[in-house]
Image (cartoon, rainbow, N blue to C red):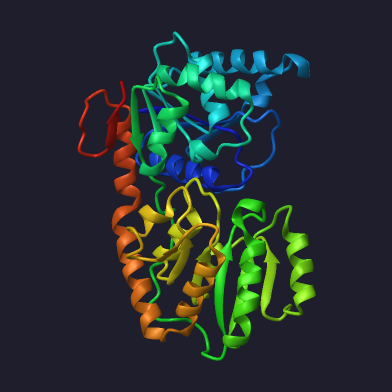
Amino acid sequence: MHILFLVSSMHGGGAERVAATLANAWARRGDTVTLVCCYSGRGACAYALDARVRLLWLADRIQGPRWRRPLDKLRALRALARETAPDRVLSFLTNVNVTVLLATRGLGLPVVVSERTDPAHSVNLEPALRMLRRWTYPWARRVVVQTRQSLPRLMAVAPGTRRLSVIPNPLPDGLPAPRAREPGAPARRRLAALGRFNPVKRFEALIEVFADLAPRHPDWDLVIWGDGPRRVACLGRVAELGLEDRILLPGRTEAPWRELAGAHAFVLSSAVEGFPNALLEAMALGLPCVATDCPSGPRELSRGGRDAQLVPAGDDAALAAALDQLMSATPQWREDLGHRAAASVRARYGLDGILRQWDAAWSDEAGSPEIHEYEHD
């Protein structure tokens, strides 16, 4: 089986990490995988790829002037599709999806495209791209979203789409086993958060919430790993609060699993998510978690709040109350919540099961038991 897999880039990010996980898994089982970065530049791959995955940069095949770049990209993609003659085509992200559907039109290739954010909150899409998505998505063999919550929103923005499926992200390769007990000495405990410092993560609000709780919980620290445009402002606010020794913003980590495994709890404070990989991995590692019930993902990951504490998105008082309860609880209570979360997500989001769902995505047989399928007339 030859799979042509098209993404924007491999510079880093949740969609790119999932692309690496899937490409590696397909290559290990013997499929031929060509992974193509369609971004207009080149750059480096931030994730380890199996030696059998062929990584291409579309920019290497585009020689024309910048003003002609969109048309040249379509021509280069069409030529690549003809050259590789894949059995399956998979595309991630709206702009890549539209480009791939245009470039492969009429070639008779089975193209599956996947939205990687909640369609209702794709606020940065230009009007032309929104129109092209509405026009081209009905051409796809299937359109995939990551959560059930995203389905009606996709139907609203691409109403002609006939076949839609929900395929969540898998747990990544090499994730350590869930820990047995809370780590570290009991003198200090860490509440962890992880992500890019942008407004939708609401790390500024999380800092304010924790600052109010800090006097009640002198043995807890907040650590937020990540980088991004709001980190400097967050560092400044922490300094204003005089909490540099209690609220730590160490930047991007190359070992997120190690950092999470060394924490005592995890918090997701986002206003919007596509599919919160950090929450999935924290739960799989056995951390007790508090998460906002934001679109989309936390409700499905936590089974409606059974495996993590859910609070309304944007409700800082509710977030504070949930964190207060978690930090006040006994270690046994936190361990029980973390163990339940780990067992739940490892059973539902294991790589083998998710691969079976992707395999079924190219099937024309309705009602496949391996995939959540929805027909849309």
Q: Is residue 34 above or below residue 357?
A: above
Residue at screen point 36% across, 53% down: 300
The residue lying toward the viewer, choosing from 293 and 86, is: 293
The residue lying toward the viewer, choosing from 209 and 60, is: 209
For residue 225, say whether it is visible.
Answer: no
Q: Quadrant of residue 65?
A: top right
Left or right: 240 in relation to 279:
right
Residue at screen point 62% across, 58% down: 202
The spot of residue 299 in percent (x, y) is: 39, 55
Q: Residue furthest bottom?
A: 187
Left or right: 332 in relation to 277:
left
The spot of residue 61 in percent (x, y) is: 66, 20
Q: Quadrant of the C terminus?
A: top left
Q: Is residue 331 above or below residue 117?
A: below
Number of marks present in the image shown: 0
The spot of residue 236 in percent (x, y) is: 79, 67
Residue at screen point 26% across, 23% down: 364
For residue 79, say whether it is visible.
Answer: yes
Q: Is residue 235 above or below residue 139?
A: below
Left or right: 243 in relation to 282:
right
Q: Quadrant of residue 10?
A: top right
The residue lying toward the viewer, choosing from 67 and 108, is: 67
Q: Is residue 141 above or below residue 232?
A: above
Residue at screen point 49% across, 45% down: 274
Q: Residue furthest top?
A: 106
The spot of residue 110 in percent (x, y) is: 38, 20
Q: Quadrant of the N terminus?
A: top left
The residue lying toward the viewer, choosing from 272 and 190, is: 272
